[in-house]
Image (spheres, rainbow, N blue to C red):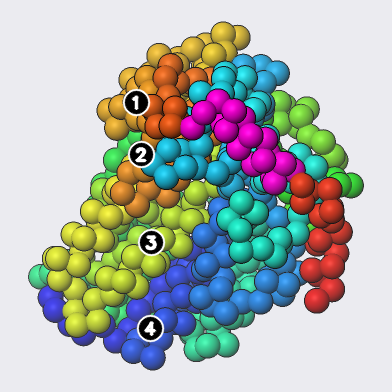
Amino acid sequence: MNNIIKKVVILGGGTAGWMSAAMIKKLIGSAVEIELIESEQIGTVGVGEATIPPIKLFNSVLGIDEAEFLRETKATIKLAIKFENWKNQGDSYYHTFGAAGRSLAFCQFHHLLKRANQLENDQHLWQYDLNYLCAEAGKFAKINSQDPIYDMPYAYHFDAGLYAQFLRKFSEKIGVKRTEGMVQHVQQCQESGYIQALQLTDGRQIAGDLFIDCSGFKGLLIQEKLATGYEDWSHWLQCDRAIAVPSERLEKTLPYTRSIAHSAGWQWRIPLQHRNGNGLVYSSRYYSDQQAQDLLLANLDTKPLAEPKLLRFNTGRRRQQWNKNVVAIGLSSGFLEPLESTSIHLIQSAITRLVHLFPHQGINDVLVSEYNKQSKIEFEQVRDFIILHYHVNQRTDSRFWQDMRTLNVPDSLAHKIELFAESGRLFKEQDDLFQDSSWLQVMVGQGIIPKDYHPIANSVSEAALNEMLAKVKHAKHEPVSSLPSHDEFLKAALKQ
Ligand SMILES: Cc1cc2nc3c(=O)[nH]c(=O)nc-3n(C[C@H](O)[C@H](O)[C@H](O)COP(=O)(O)OP(=O)(O)OC[C@H]3O[C@@H](n4cnc5c(N)ncnc54)[C@H](O)[C@@H]3O)c2cc1C
């Protein structure tokens, strides 16, 4: 099959569907017609509130004004995730979007800290991190400086339902056709197995050349029709359920997500302008649904605003995220729990990949296999980073945490942990979403202190090292006091 792609049909109007529609129309819309089908009767998954910094690039490619976006999606600023009780009960650490200190040529900053005996006390690292200092102080503003020492990468917390609506308006304005209706039958070519058209319950037929399956967990096209198969990772990531509930907003809006570990799972607290998002991710082997719900409701900061909602999931990925003329994007392509807020990013990156590999002259095996290879590597890298948080823990208070500790982790992760523990060496795998600074913070935060440091750290004298560390620390602390609070920033930004 090698037909020129003239029409793209997107099935699903959740975050994945509308992000796909907006970006594909914006970038290649002059060459293809785009129609999105969604069913209000089915609705969307209705969760997904925390993001990571590349979302800013997504919005900026679409030409979205930040103030309008903040207003329309009730967004707040996210500088970090605070992990509480993960290493041990009572401990906490941050995974910030920033990087600690300033590295020398060929020598990452943490080797210098190790040499100065400042890595042993796991609080030192963050004293050199502007994101951490602002998160703790509840402050935020964009610092106008070319000096990378003042870089403060950020992302957003937002209402994913409002984001989808915002992108729907945007997409319809630039020419995406939206069709309300429920798909009942899928027509497939007998010979090639390619999807030809989707038939709605009222009999309407929507034909296309390329179909993007954004139908959520069930994967109506990629799985129910094409039986693509699923690689199950639940032996590594054993949480398989979540209970979510919104609650009243806190008086002071934190510029970070809280991730609080419990005896068999963890709880998120996400501050939005109008409410808090809360949820408990847990393993059904260790908690009943009732226990999980009781635990969540007993651990809210503020009054719940709705009935708790139970969500079941199966951690893993679709064996081929592009199969025949169907590309699965969003929940239909696989799922990794929201510990590092990666799902919306995986949507963004799948769309980017599809745009790069867009089969304008027709679908061929080379494009499909390149797409599938890149998607597989990306999912596996994120998977490893998430497993790290669970595996490297020192908790002795519950069976769950002990089981996580003794888990046989993927070889790729075991190697990374060993390399760091021995000599502090950290290498970013090609295209790994998470930079060295992310791996460093989670490894140190979870209690891995390397035995040694790189000898290049000895290239400066002890006096020069101490002076340099003091200067860097001063530079990182210095701007914080003059920055507005996060709430003051939001108030000013929303007025624009
Ligand atoms: C507990 C939990 C917490 C999460 N937290 C985060 C987070 O903090 N950060 C993050 O990045 N991500 C998070 N996610 C993931 C995020 O919610 C999803 O990645 C995102 O919402 C995309 O969902 P979707 O569009 O793929 O699917 P859905 O929202 O389920 O949308 C599916 C769409 O398909 C349509 N549809 C289905 N069947 C048919 C049919 N037969 N006919 C017509 N239309 C149909 C539906 O109407 C709907 O429009 C979380 C997920 C879960 C489960």
Who comes first in sequence, dot 4 or dot 1? Answer: 4
Q: Are marks 1 and 2 in contact (CB under 8 Å)?
A: yes
Q: Which residues are magenta?
A: 460-477
Who comes first in sequence, dot 4 or dot 2? Answer: 4
Q: Are marks 3 and 2 in contact (CB under 8 Å)?
A: no
Pick out the residue farthest to the left: 191
Q: Check the image and report above or below for 375 versus 454.
A: below
Q: Are marks 1 and 3 in contact (CB under 8 Å)?
A: no
SS assignment at label 4:
helix
Question: How far apart are labels 4 and 2 at the CA level?
Answer: 36 Å
Question: How far apart are labels 4 and 3 at the CA level?
Answer: 15 Å
Question: How far apart are labels 1 and 3 at the CA level?
Answer: 30 Å
SS assignment at label 3:
helix
| Residue 464 among those drawn in magenta | yes
Viewport quadrant of the C terminus: bottom right
| Label 1: how many Cα within 10 Å (few below 14, some 14–19, many 20+) | some
| Label 3: how many Cα within 10 Å (few below 14, some 14–19, many 20+) | many
Mark 4 highlights which residue? 28
127 left or right of 177 in image: right
| Label 4: how many Cα within 10 Å (few below 14, some 14–19, many 20+) | few
Mark 1 highlights which residue? 419
Q: Residue at x 59, y 28 (%)?
A: 463
Residue 84 placed where, x, y %?
66, 27
Q: Nearer the viewer, residue 412 or 38?
A: 412
Who comes first in sequence, dot 1 or dot 3? Answer: 3
Is residue 75 something one can see in this rendering? no
Q: Amino acid at mark 3?
A: Ala
SS assignment at label 2:
loop
| Residue 356 among those drawn in magenta | no
Quadrant hosting residue 487: bottom right
SS assignment at label 1:
helix
Mark 3 highlights which residue? 350
